[in-house]
Amino acid sequence: MTTYRPNMTGLTSVEAKRLQAQYGKNELAQQKKESLLKKVFHIICEPMFLLLIVAAIIYFLLGEPRDGAIMLIFVVGIISIDVIQEWKTDKTLNALKDLSAPHCTVIRDGKEQQIASVDLVPGDLMMIHEGVKIPADGLVLRCADLCVDESSLTGEAEGVWKTPTESTEPTKDHWRKDYCYAGTLVTQGNAVVQVDTIGVQTEYGKIGLGVIAAPNEDTPLQKQTGKLVKTCAIIAGVLFALVAVFTWFNIPDHTIMDRLIESILSGVTLAMAMIPEEFPVILTVFLSMGAWRLAKKNSLVRKLPSVETLGAVSVLCVDKTGTITMNQMTVQDVWTTSGATEQELVETMGLGCETDAYDPMEKAMLRYCEDYGITKESLFSNEFVSEYAFTNELKMMGHVWRKKGHLIIAAKGSPERILSICKLGEEERRTIESQIKTLSSQGLRVIAVATAKPENESAIPAVITDCRLTLLGLVGLADPPRESVKEDIAVCNRAGIRVVMITGDNGITASAIANKIGIPGSENIITGEELEAMGDGELQEAVKTVSIFSRVIPEHKMRIVRAFKENGEIVAMTGDGVNDAPALKYADIGIAMGKRGSEVSREASDLILMDDNFTTIVETVRDGRRIYDNIRKAVGYVFTIHIPIAAASLLAPLLGIEPTALMLLPLHVVLLEVLIDPTCSIVLERQPAEEDVMDRAPRDPKEKLLTGRLLGKSVLQGIFVFAASFGAYFATLAGNSANAPEARAMGLAIIMLANLFLVQVNSSNHDFAYHSAKQLVKDRVVWAVNLGTLALLAIILYTPISTFLKLAPLSGIQALTALGLAAASVLWYELVKLIRRLQGMKRKGIK
Ligand code: ADP
Ligand code: MG
């Protein structure tokens, strides 16, 4: 147990900068950046743009270069919006990546500091400790009990004990004992390592492992909507043909060339109106913005699909210590056996702690010693002889000291284990066990303290389990639950999310705390031992009712997650240790701790909790639900708003209306697209959570994004808007092509105004529109978009631009009529909500 503070100074930041210029970054593969040109190219290759460009070309062919030019301006406009959009999401995602990228501690400018591991340079002094994945190759300058798992490089499962560089002769072994390799894992101890090589120069880099970075796979939702877009495109293709044929027969008096061009043009209009190209955009924007908003609230999403999954979480498995509790322990009670004095107990407890205690429990014990009048200095001025290290399996530890010439073993740990190596009479054992129960049922962590006095060094047993100890007494430590935990558990209970507590503590303690914070079924406990005796099927059955697992070791977590998953639950699981990594990977949402977690657990996780706080987990799930809700709202909205556009482009030619008098020309479809995009990606993305998000059960993970119900509602709403807009257009046209600009203006105005109402109405399925409008009153961005829509409408109707767009200004009466029709075509849905509410109330009344 050598402890030391390195007094080495390391590089200066100036040197580091110079070295980085020379050696580059410490990364295996350089991030490939998509050039702007490539991005634009990708966007242009989308079917929507191909259609736009076809339309523009046709205009030029028709000898209407002005129309063609306007189209092209729109095309450029939409491409710019898309490029900016993409650039923004890229930036967001990269910022998130940087935040969750591995960091390491180095000594620079004579100070310990955290830097991103990619910024390591040869010559840096890095400090590594248990749980760290070594980020570069380097020489071990100093170390204490440093054990490294090098299996990722050598395939050798056994840990390798390292030695400082000066203490070994250079050997011929390829894998050196005084050298640390990138990509390997510190399993014990700590060290100062001087970085030697970085990036692809490291042994790890040379093998080429890790270069094959996981490709950015589409999320389940992205796959679903991909299919949806394809289906729509196929339907659009069929209707394209239909409309083209109809148009052909509508104008028998035109020249063949004209007939051909007009036919294609009306077909293209319809196809443009039908393809819901917004879907993929919605997903990337909603998910990445969602992740960004979560990052601001202390939870870092490492994998984008997790944002989707979060809303479906049905079981939350959390570590007790530090997540549910504050991990701020205090010694609350001590109890001595009849043969021992309190002084003896307290002193032995102190001697059983690490000299530079890191564990909050040991810190609490040492604080208690100080209060008792036993200072650290007096404790640790004795001569340290050897130690029995703590392991998760043993759940106890001990130190051997030489005090005033006499050897003394100071051991402490879980009472079950310590008692098993103590000499005790039957009677005595019973008294102690009842005392343990008393302390535990107050929610205290109980630690037993025991001692032995070996004659000489050869009488010191090699392992702690061979010791025959004398029990001195028990210590009860309190670790209060975090303040808001009770409230959060109540929220989870209402939201149909089961909170499962996992702890190394004993069952009675765990149960007492679970009871205190309101976890249902706190009397049912499974201990690690019971778990081990159970078969997988048995465990699967047991987890249906049991929410507390006590005396578990990290390896058990994997089985717990599996049991829940087999039952069809969506499981989120927290973990901090190296051994938690497999369970974190296996859980649907693996949650690592930002503060006390190991690098390995972070790497295995989907989400990093920056403040280690249970409240943040619950908030994150809530946000996950909100984001999913909003995605659905946006998808529903896109369907609704496309219906009047597509139906108008379809119906007008079928009704035999002349091509020049159609309600929507390609120009107008594009104009509407310009409006629809920001409505989705800005307004709907910002929708606050509905009041009942955490009052309903988690969504069924198998349920499709677009359910029959949502589709039905959207189609119905779309038909209403279509009826209003097309009806107004048709009535104004009155069979005379000369009225077309005015009629068109009516139709377009109604769609645009209806768009504003739609967002409000659909922001909740039961809260009334005024309610959501109230919530958004303070949101400036939403205001900007709404006012922008009105301004756009004013510009296209009342400025000279209107003639370019083949529109005509509307009179006051007409404008009011448009507004009224738009409102009526959407707000009827408020009545549906009202009826549902009344029904709901009646149902409750009957009960
Ligand atoms: P948790 O999962 O609640 O964090 P731990 O795995 O840290 O629990 O600890 C499990 C048990 O091991 C404790 O209840 C205690 O009995 C014992 N223990 C933990 N840390 C120490 C220590 N430093 N010294 C002695 N015993 C310990
Ligand atoms: Mg612990």
Image (cartoon, rainbow, N blue to C red):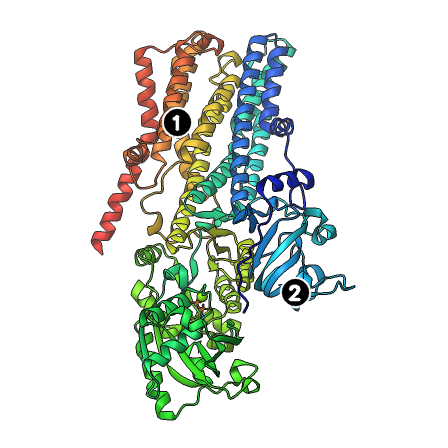
Q: Residues within 10 Å of mark 1 (few under 14, many from 20)?
A: many
Between residue 818 and residue 557, name the one nearer to us: 557
Please provide percent x and percent y for residue 293.
43, 41
| Residue assigned mark 1 | 755
Q: Nearer the viewer, residue 438 or 718?
A: 438
Pick out the residue farthest to the front.
Answer: 404
Q: Quadrant of ligand 1?
A: bottom left
Can residue 277 be seen here? no
Asked whether, in this view, residue 153 is left or right of residue 788, the answer is right
In what element is the residue under mark 1? Answer: helix
**Residue 551, image quadrant:** bottom left
Label disc, if present, on residue 163 of the rendered structure: 2
Query: What secondary structure is found at the residue carrying circle 2?
Result: loop
Q: Is residue 583 above or below residue 745?
A: below
Q: CA distance from mark 2 to mark 1?
A: 70 Å
Please indicate whether residue 229 sits to the left or right of residue 320 in the image: right
Residue 286 vs residue 674, the one in the foreground:
286
Q: Is residue 557 left or right of residue 723?
A: right
Between 6 and 632, the residue placed more toward the observer is 6
Q: Residue at x 36, y 42 (%)?
A: 689
Where is residue 685 drawn, in percent x and y? 42, 36
Is residue 751 among what the camera can see?
A: yes
Which image quarter holds the N terminus? bottom right
Q: Amino acid at mark 1?
A: Asn
Q: Position of residue 9 (x, y in %)?
A: 57, 50
Of pointers 2 and 1, the one earlier in the residue sequence: 2
Give the percent coordinates (x, y) of residue 254: 60, 9
Given the current orientation, which residue lies at the most extreme right position?
172
